[in-house]
Image: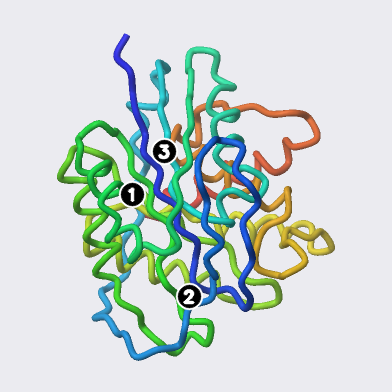
Amino acid sequence: MKAFVILVILAVAGCSQSAQNPSPSTLGSTTTGLSTTTTEGASTTTTASTTTPTAPTTTTSSAGGTLSILFVGNSHTSTHDIPRTVRELLDSDPARQTTVELMSAGFLRIAANDVAITDAIGSGDWDIVVLQGQEISQSHSIAYSQEEAVALAELAIESGARALLFSEWPRKGIDETEYIEKIYDEIAEASGAEVVPVGRTWDLYLADLPDNNLWASDGNHSNSDGAFLAAATLAHVIAGPDAGLTTATALEHFLRTARLTVESYFADG
């Protein structure tokens, strides 16, 4: 049986109000304690029109087989071990066997200048590359360069991979899901990548259960529930919303919310 390989690049979003050191990864690689705060500097980029969502390609993941996933990120990725949760959700299909690894990168501009990461993306060994960590203005007033993110996505596509962009959750108490997603839409439009609408999943969940909390105490990182929602959204985009992923009974509401988000997102396109 053909082995399928997924590379997931996750570098934390630049929309935090405070720096947090990452939790130690359980996956055996180093995660740096970089601040997730984006400095409000003068870097700018030319914006593009919003891309239209397209249904996820599920050929590689829904067919079963072996999946190898490399995550590159910092504390937004390692906290509550999103890579492990994605693996467990994908492997709820008994025909699939998934392995995950974690590398570290603070932002996509850092990943773009990391030879180990760019060599891995361009190697042609991966079926899917997921990029997360575009620098985002806290004040929503600065447009940071998207060139590095576009270049990484194009490198992935040129090497034969499907490129996915992880659009992060909003900070607590700030209505910014649409703002964040629009930035990733612009990168997708410029590169041919697809967007993973994690922020929409959080918004849908909170619309149903507004008294529940998805954030850590800093109001930026996720708690375990928020991390599960992010992982479930990734897994449904990777495998497809009709893949029949399963989880523990206590977590079924989170999984269902992620599935409904992905179904609606691609149906809108």
Q: Amino acid at mark 3?
A: Leu
Rounded to the nearest whole Å, what is the CA distance between mark 1 and mark 2?
A: 20 Å
Q: At which x and y percent is residue 105?
A: 43, 56
Q: Secondary structure at mark 1?
A: loop
Q: At which x and y percent is residue 235?
A: 51, 37
Residue marked by disc 2: 179
Q: Residue furthest left?
A: 158
Q: Nearer the viewer, residue 122 or 265?
A: 122
Q: Amino acid at mark 2?
A: Tyr
- Are the residues at dot 3 and dot 1 in contact (C-beta closer than 8 Å)? no
Residue 203, compared with residue 44, is above or below; it is: above
Q: Nearer the viewer, residue 54 or 112?
A: 112
Rounded to the nearest whole Å, what is the CA distance between mark 2 and mark 3?
A: 27 Å
Judged left or right of residue 126, residue 226 is right
Q: Nearer the viewer, residue 28 or 78?
A: 28
Classed neighbour count for the residue bearing mark 3: other residues with Cα under 10 Å, few (<14), some (14–19), many (≥20): many
- Place residue 1 in its image quadrant: top left
Q: At which x and y percent is residue 111?
A: 34, 58
Q: Amino acid at mark 1?
A: Thr
Residue marked by disc 3: 70
Q: Residue at x 54, y 36 (%)?
A: 28
**Quadrant location of the C terminus in the rendered image:** bottom left
